[in-house]
Image (tube, rainbow, N blue to C red):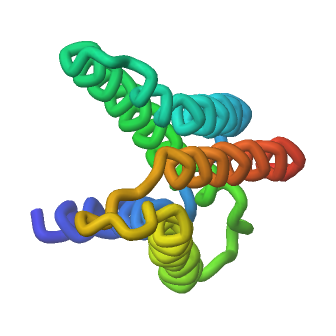
Amino acid sequence: QQQQQQQQQQQLQPQQQQTSSTEISSPPREGKQMDKSVLVVGMILFGLVSAATPLIKFSDDLHNRKIISATISGLMGASFGAVYARFQSCLWQTLPPDADLANAMGFASVPKVCGCGIGSFVAGLLLDLYRVPKDPLQHVSVGGYWAISLLCTVSSVISAVLLIRLKIG
């Protein structure tokens, strides 16, 4: 009986080693074109929705502004979520099979965080440039929001074009 148990354990050990090595390696590279195309469409949709954000100003009715704002926010959240979820998958697919995954993923998180920080800083500067002069409440003119929307749209489209040219796998 002990001999049978030892034989079973010996048979299981190579299987366990195989499983642990596949867990460490990158995920399968199936569906990479689908991930990439969904990512590109999401990026372009995000850019278009960003461009539409200042259109809220053109409605005089507060109720309509709330509806437009909620619709734009929902579309922006959905497109951003789709892009963010697919980005990780595409990132995994660009890594070579022998890559050190921990270092690669740690390094990849740095540009994402830097992009958020730099983007917020630039948006703040743009809004500061469009502050209404001599306004005690320091309102920002609509031009500032147009500038931010245009910057988001241009950045999204440029990113999508760069991604289209990127070869995955």
Is residue 93 in view? Answer: yes
Indicate whether 107 appears above or below 65. Answer: below
**Could you say where residue 11 lies in the image, as x and y percent from the top left?**
37, 61
Furthest residue toward right: 165
Name which residue lies at 36% across and 64% down. Answer: 16
Tell me if 5 is positioned left or right of 160 in this view.
left
Q: Quadrant of residue 164?
A: top right
Name which residue lies at 26% across and 15% down. Answer: 61
**Could you say where residue 119 lies in the image, as x and y percent from the top left?**
53, 68
**Could you say where residue 50 lies in the image, as x and y percent from the top left?**
53, 38
**Is 122 in front, or is 61?**
61
Q: How many marks?
A: 0
Is residue 21 in view? Answer: no
Furthest residue toward front: 134
**Is 59 in front, or is 68?**
59
**Could you say where residue 75 lies in the image, as x and y percent from the top left?**
41, 27
Indicate whether 127 appears above or below 81. Answer: below
Q: Quadrant of residue 72?
A: top left
Name which residue lies at 55% across and 36% down. Answer: 46
Name which residue lies at 65% across and 46% down. Answer: 150
Furthest residue toward left: 1
Tell me if 165 is positioned left or right of 37 in this view.
right
